[in-house]
Image: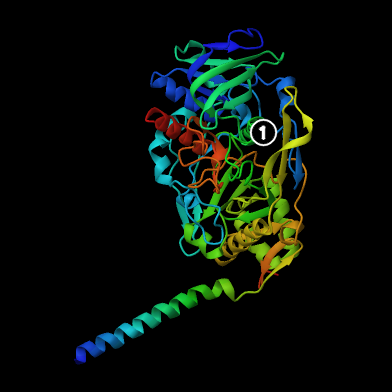
Amino acid sequence: MLIDLNASPTSLPKHAEFCIAGSGPAGMTLALELEQRGRSVLLLEGGGLEWTPESYELYKGDVVGDYYVGLEYARARQLGGTSGHWGGWSYQLTELAFKEKPGFEDAQWPIEKKDLDPFLEKARAILDINAPPDDVLLDREFGIKEFRIAYSRVKFGQMYRERLTSSQHITCVTGATLTGLKTNGRNIVDATVTNFSGKSANVTAKYFILAMGGIENSRMLLWFNHQANGELVDSRAPLGRYWMEHPAYQVGYALVDLKIPKTEYFRPHLLLTFTEEVFQKLGILECSFVLEGISSTGTKGLLKDLICVAPRVGEWAASLAGKNIVCGARFIIGWEQEPLWSNYVKLSETKRDRFGIPTAELHWKKSDRDRATMQKAITYFNEFLMAKKHGRVKLADWVFAKDGYPSSGNDGVSYHHIGGTRMAHVVEKGVVDKNCRVFGQSNLYIAGSSVFPSGGEANPTLSIVQLSLRLADHLLHT
Amino acid sequence: MCSRRAFLIGLFFLSQMGLVNKIYAEVPTRKNRKFLKQGWLLQEGDV
């Protein structure tokens, strides 16, 4: 059943077995999985069926630190959440992402990749993708891997709307913002839900799950905890802390004789990364490179430039170009950001949204080690290109400068909001335990990338869906 | 005894050759000086 709380303010059910706030990939996956097992679910969506100016207003916030896009542009408050305009790149986190990494003690998960693997096939079905071809080890000596991914076209709001409408077990309510969460210190007793006109109603449930996104999960939990005078979240928990992105930049151009494959929905691109041994040897977190093919005119321009600057290697490249072997490419790197206490979401002290809730203030800065990750990775990749005669790269001036990053448009932004309610073995290190349950509360859970303790180098949605399926499994066996 | 000694000496030379080959294999990636020129990352012999 699908209800609009703005049109029918009294239609909110008073009780559900599971109350899920947020209908993006995390919340929707959880709702669909619980429905399939015959359980009753109340799925709350703060926005409408589509994006509206009102919902856009609710996502405004401030960013302090490094350049970032406005928070209202970085997410979508609508049925299906930010999957309404995502890129669809889907691949798994590596085994390394979960492991302890020397020098990066906080970049470790309390679970392993094998804990998510059983949910992979179902996650792919939800995203309507097949398994991509296996990775290819391009160079054993340098540990360079070509990795393959799947491209999902699923927008959750469109894909699953009919199923929600006809469902006997899911009541999906749009225009329904979760504005309160009452605890008795150990359990959530009830939740307050408010429509755009400010009309509120309470709902009780056996379990409450927050799946509102990688910024809202922190913001709303901070607010609910404030309302509960700190009785909701253990004061030792790093609530809102360790917020991360996948910094990604075009660092220049490359002329390479590597085959850049065509893709169905995007420009031709070659995806490369290092083996686990290389990351360990370089002492950096994970990263990946995208070589995105450019036009033949662009390639000719790069060749001309290289011939002027370095005639000998330029002529070699030109001779290969004559045989259509050399390609020009945008050279893009994205990397796993170091998880830091000092990157966090907090409640604004001066600004409030239409419900009177403080807006989000994101404090976010890339560290010196983040910069070192980028520089070491580029240096190593360049050594590979030179040693194996695969080409040359032309870098932007800022890449090897001491500090500073480009700061316009999508510079540095992947729209991947990670951390804030991280998962850990102990409350001093996390907000939720390995089953995504908030420490200290028996029936409050969190779904989505806000529970990731570290980001790895994979786009997060496939892992988010896997984690939601695992959470459903846990809730059904609790 | 003699064959054991020959085996050990042979093993020693084989292991040294492996080491030499390994070092040799790494030399091409290390010996050329790398430098930046007008944004291009280059090495000796490129210009």
The quarter of the image holding the C terminus of chain A is top left
For image coordinates 73% across by 42% down, the residue present is: A68
For image coordinates 70% across by 16% down, the residue present is: A196
Extreme residue toward the left, this view: B1
Image position of A466 (left or right of A417): left
The chain that hosts pointer 1 is A
- Would you place residue A165 above or below residue A56 in this image? above
Extreme residue toward the bottom, this view: B2
Total marks in image: 1
**Image quadrant of residue A178?**
top right
Residue A200: % across, % down: 65, 15
Judge by depth and name the residue closer to the eye, A356 or A85. Answer: A356
Residue A179: % across, % down: 65, 23
Judge by depth and name the residue closer to the eye, A88 or A370. Answer: A370
Classify mark 1: residues with Cα within 10 Å, few (<14), some (14-19) or many (20+). Answer: some
Q: Secondary structure at mark 1?
A: helix
- Would you place residue A445 above or below residue A387 in this image? above
Look at mark 1 in the image and give the residue it sits on.
A226
Image position of A225 (left or right of A133): right
Q: Is residue A449 visible?
A: yes
Image position of B14 (left or right of A3): left
